[in-house]
Amino acid sequence: MRRRLLPTLILLVSAVAAAQVVRTGDPVKRGLSETDFPRIQTLAEGVYSYEQLRSAGAETFTTVSLFVVSDVGVLVADGQGSVAETQRMIDEIATITSQPIKHVVIGSDHGDHTAGNRAFPADVTYYAHPTSKALLDAAASRADSSPAAVSKITPVERQTTVTLSGTEIQILFLGRAHTGGDLSVYLPKEKVLFMSEAYLNRIFPAMRSAYPSEWVTTIERAQAMDVTTYVPGHGFVESPVVLREELETARQALVQVIAEGRRLHMAGVPVADAMTQAQFGDLETWTLRSSQGPTAIRRVYLELDGGLK
């Protein structure tokens, strides 16, 4: 009888734990402070998430990286937002393994994930979608400070696989989402999927360079995969149960923002007015709503007007 009840008991404990999680991207509301970071969590054997606080005006939230440790080297998915922050992550990784970092996946080409890449060893192999590679190469040609742009980048148009001491790591392009070249990192045996900025956990949908409707489709492709743990690029890394729930919440948030933009567009409201008039219901309290709400409406209008190729 006890053996039959055990799975039910585990489910009940997981459900209670999930219910107790404060669903927010705001560390203050979570009772966390700067001294609680950086935070490393073990997701599977040799697979870790790394959360570091960053600020946007008065608001703080986390930027998340992933790293995979083996006895022949380390793969990192996404750097941090400055050389100092990325070096701090490298130093933290060194407390877990003495193996060198050999591979860096550029899941998002935005500066909060690439601006510190100069801290990585000079001989690492970078992986980026061709769209992201072109942006980083263009930055290099302008003598910009994007360090990844001056390093060798292997383009990943759809999928490539890196194997580290028997650990299979798939680098995937699931579709345009937060940027035109979002890459995800999938470990099929461990059933871990790092989605970079294609998954924002309780962070208002940031659409500066997004493809709103395609972003929804990209998340749905991820949801159809054999995954236990979905890892976001921003927001807290939770239990697998909560992360799966919050991925669906993120998808619904995108749908909600698109619907509000479409409503205003159909009503003939000029985009400048729509950016201030938009109301997002329960998303009004989400982290970065004030800065990202107007940007999202502008991007939805651009998509509706056929301005996104």
Image: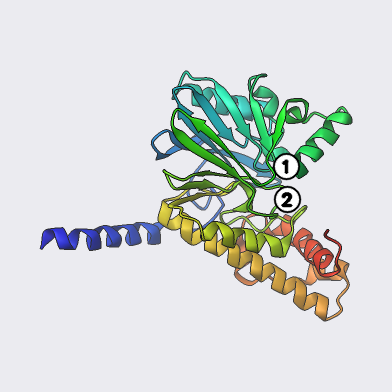
- 192 sits to left or right of 25: left
**Of residues 90 and 166, the one drawn nearer to the viewer in this rendering:** 166
Which amino acid type corresponds to the residue marked 2 in the rendered image? Answer: Thr
User: Going 12% across and 59% down the picture, which residue do you hit?
Assistant: 2
Amino acid type of the residue that numbered disc 1 sits on in the rendered structure:
His
Q: Pointer 1: what residue?
A: 110
Picture coordinates of residue 286, whole percent (x, y): 61, 60
In this view, 146 is above or below 64: above
Image coordinates of residue 92 in percent, x first then y, are 51, 26
Q: Which sits earlier in the primary sequence, circle 2 or circle 1? A: 1
Residue 88 point in image, percent of width and height:
58, 26
Q: Is residue 215 above or below residue 32?
A: below
Labels 2 and 1 touching (C-beta < 8 A) = yes
Please provide percent x and percent y for residue 149. 77, 30
Q: Quadrant of residue 152?
A: top right
* Residue placed under numbered mark 2 in the picture: 179
Residue 69 in view (yes/no): yes
